Image (tube, rainbow, N blue to C red):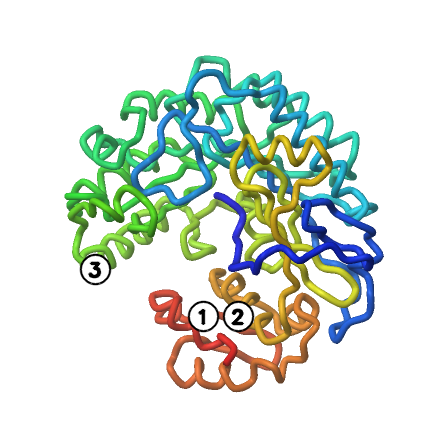
Amino acid sequence: MSSPGTSIPPLVADAPAGGVRSDGAISDPVHYMRMGTLRFGAPPPLSLYVHLPWCLKKCPYCDFNSHEARGAVPEDRYIDALIADLEASLPIVWGRTVISIFFGGGTPSLFSPESLERLIGAIRARLRLAPDCEITLEANPGTFERDRFRAFRAAGVTRLSVGVQTFDDTHLKAIGRVHDGAQARAALEEAASAFSTFNLDLMYALPGQTMAQLEADVATALAFRPPHLSIYHLTVEPNTYFAKHPPRLPEEDDAYAMLDRITEMTGAAGLERYEISAYARGDHACRHNLNYWRFGDYLGIGAGAHGKLTFAHRVVRQVRFREPELYMRQALAGRPLAQENEVTRADLPFEYMINALRLKDGFALEDFSARTGLAVTAIAQPLELAEKQGLITRDLHHVKPTVRGFDFLSDLQALFLGD
């Protein structure tokens, strides 16, 4: 998955105080430490998101920053740009330990294992990684070659996320995937053999999909005994091919019934639903995504990557230049940032809740204060309203969504929007 982002205002003009200049450079880190109205203690855990934007073919439902590879992907130059981007960012994350790294796209598995090894080596040389740092690579079965996944493992990747979406060849064609069901099965067999933990991505409510076909997809997925399963409802996003040419999708009630059946089947197979779209065995929950949902910090590098960083008196969001060629030019010149903004006090409750309420176990009230710098009184009224509507349960220390809250998550999160 790409890192979460929010609407960000235009880049500010040059300012002697530091921060982001209009040319995209990162200035004096003292700028980020100046006094403000919030007060944070120790910063939250830090992750690294690395965006590799090329893919074999743009899927008609995809609204991520992905670009079809027309000819050879400029691997060496792009990795040079990523390293330069990281170098420019070091002053604002210096001394912090990175708990997870996620290579997202696009299709990161288009890059060679040798290129990934060079990049991971460069990251290790510049950042302090936790001894058990989770390093995830998204992979498309359409790029699968025998022994390629093992080479990624040898390069330093510890977790593979395989974007199957469906095993049904008719549905794969309908959603524009470049692989077929046989390739998906072969990729999963190799992932299970090469990695001690991996993720399988599925989608449901596909064009023309029936309950029986959904059950067949889930049963096939579970036959590979995935430690982690991510299952997403196909949605029509703005500025996609499907937005211009909408497919005929299952009715909303049918989609809800599909989700209920998914939860039944995964539960019977020993997978626990720990997040709105994720199921895992034991301790195989995705640590990188958990850091997002717990409102941790993440540095995002690469074309169009988003980041969120906490300083002593503020929370800052960043976005890199989106178009790959422009990004490479800017990053290699030490100016990777396209936009930056400070999250306002009024927006912090919603920013926190849009993440934390995705988790089945919810959040501790003390964590809300630690991550936002706000007192719990800032969310007293929406919490009371959510409880009256049966969307949450809570005690003096903890808040968690109910089954109804999970089913109507957008409505629950919206209660925390500022005026």
Residue 342 shows in the view: yes
Q: Quadrant of residue 410?
A: bottom left
Residue 188 shows in the view: no
Q: Amino acid at mark 2?
A: Phe
At horizontal 72% and vertical 37% (from top left) the residue drawn is 86
Describe the element under mark 2 as helix, strand or loop: helix
Query: Which is more N-terminal, label 1 or label 3?
Result: 3
At horizontal 74% and vertical 47% (from top left) the residue drawn is 26
Q: Which label belongs to residue 14?
A: none
Q: Nearer the viewer, residue 40 or 330?
A: 330
Q: Quadrant of residue 181?
A: top left
Residue 391 pos. (x, y %): 40, 75
**CB under 8 Å between callouts 1 and 2?**
yes
Q: Nearer the viewer, residue 31 or 368?
A: 31
- Residue marked by disc 1: 413
**CB under 8 Å between callouts 2 and 3?**
no
Q: Amino acid at mark 1?
A: Gln
Residue 16's place in the image compared with 209, above or below, is below
Query: Which is more N-terminal, label 2 or label 1?
Result: 2
- Residue marked by disc 2: 350
Q: Nearer the viewer, residue 371 or 146?
A: 371
Separation of marks 1 and 2 at Cα, in angstroms: 7 Å
- Residue marked by disc 3: 252
Describe the element under mark 3 as helix, strand or loop: helix
Q: Residues within 10 Å of mark 3 (few under 14, many from 20)?
A: few
Residue 126 pos. (x, y %): 78, 34
At horizontal 63% and vertical 22% (from top left) the residue drawn is 77
Q: Amino acid at mark 3?
A: Glu
